[in-house]
């Protein structure tokens, strides 16, 4: 089974194999995987949010706030954040220093 690569509009076929396009695709696949992992029972969501002093939340909020990031990557970061919401994580998400700014 083959996977189509996302191309930058108006860039022609040569961009299909460019390093930038492959990096974009990799970021999107990684965030899609994180989105699926975050769709888990509440205790595991809490663990995802607290591991390594909230490293995942820091990276997701940084990605969501980045104006240099591709909009589709930012959308996937928001999807991961959405899947992390639960009664166990709500307060932590609200109190995160930059997470609410990204929403």
Image: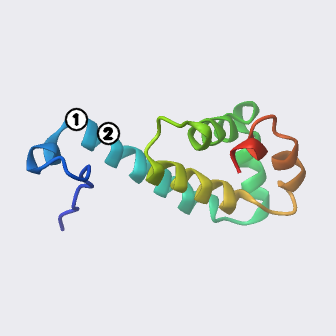
Which structural element holds mark 1? helix
Question: Measuring 26% from the left and 42% from the top, which residue is drawn there?
Answer: 22
- What residue is shown with label 1? 19
| 52 relative to 6, above or below | above
Question: Measuring 22% from the left and 62% from the top, which residue is drawn there?
Answer: 3
- Mark 1, residues whose alpha carbon is within 10 Å: few (<14), some, or many (≥20)? few
Residue 2, quarter of picture: bottom left
Give coordinates of residue 45: x percent, y percent: 73, 55
Give coordinates of residue 63: x percent, y percent: 56, 39
Question: Are the two marked residues, 2 and 1, in contact with CB atoms closer than 8 angstroms?
Answer: yes
Question: Measuring 83% from the left and 54% from the top, which residue is drawn there?
Answer: 89
Question: Measuring 43% from the left and 45% from the top, which residue is drawn there?
Answer: 70
Instruction: Compute the Cα span from label 2 to label 1.
Output: 6 Å
- What residue is shown with label 2? 23
Which structural element holds mark 2? helix
Residue 35, quarter of picture: bottom right
Question: Which is nearer the eye, 82 or 38?
Answer: 82
């Amino acid at each position: 089974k083959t996977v189509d690569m996302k191309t930058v509009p108006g860039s022609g076929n040569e961009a299909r194999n460019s390093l930038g396009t492959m990096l974009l695709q990799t970021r999107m696949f990684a965030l899609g995987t994180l989105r699926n992992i975050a769709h888990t029972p509440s205790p595991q969501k809490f663990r995802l949010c607290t591991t390594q002093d909230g490293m995942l939340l820091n990276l997701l909020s940084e990605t969501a706030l980045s104006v240099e990031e591709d909009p589709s990557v930012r959308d996937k970061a928001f999807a991961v954040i959405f899947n992390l919401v639960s009664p166990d994580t709500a307060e932590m998400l609200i109190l995160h220093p930059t997470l609410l700014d990204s929403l």
